Image (cartoon, rainbow, N blue to C red):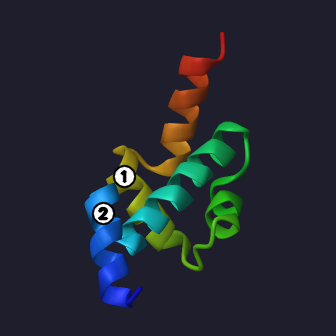
Amino acid sequence: MSVPSFHRHFKAVTTMTPVQFQKQVRLQEARRRLLCAEGVASAGYSVGYESLSQFNRDYRRAFGAPPGQDAISLRVQLLP
């Protein structure tokens, strides 16, 4: 399968490009790591970000809050 054909089929199935999908998967994994009390920088670097500022920017866009604040609010919601 050619690259353009793969890209077209991938987007038809997932409604996003492969790069967008990869970013979403990375951010979801980072969110899971933050929930397990991993530090923001550690979570960002461990999922493949080389720039902490880019990680913070992408995380805020995806989840509506900076990683540290989101982790705190998730822990409050999920833990009794």
Which quarter of the figure has residue 37? top right
Residue extending farthest top = 80
Residue 69 on image: x %, y %: 50, 40
Between residue 9 and residue 71, name the one nearer to us: 9
Q: Point out residue 11 in the picture as x, y percentages from the top left corner.
A: 29, 66
Looking at the image, which residue is at 38% across and 90% down? 2
Give the residue at x 66% y 58%: 43
Contact between labelled residues 2 and 1, with CB atoms less than 8 Å apart: no
Residue 28, percent from left and from top: 53, 50
Tell me which corner region of the image, top left, top right, bottom left or bottom right, holds residue 17: bottom left
Residue type indicated by callout 2: Met
At 34% from the left and 57% from the top, the residue drawn is: 14
Residue at image x 51%, y 49%? 67
Q: Please give the residue where the numbered disc 1 appears in the rendered image.
A: 62
Q: Residue furthest bottom?
A: 2
Horizontally, is 11 left or right of 63 in the view?
left
Say which mark, if any, is on residue 16.
2
Q: Secondary structure at mark 2?
A: loop
Locate the C terminus and report the quarter of the image it occupies: top right
Secondary structure beneath label 1: helix
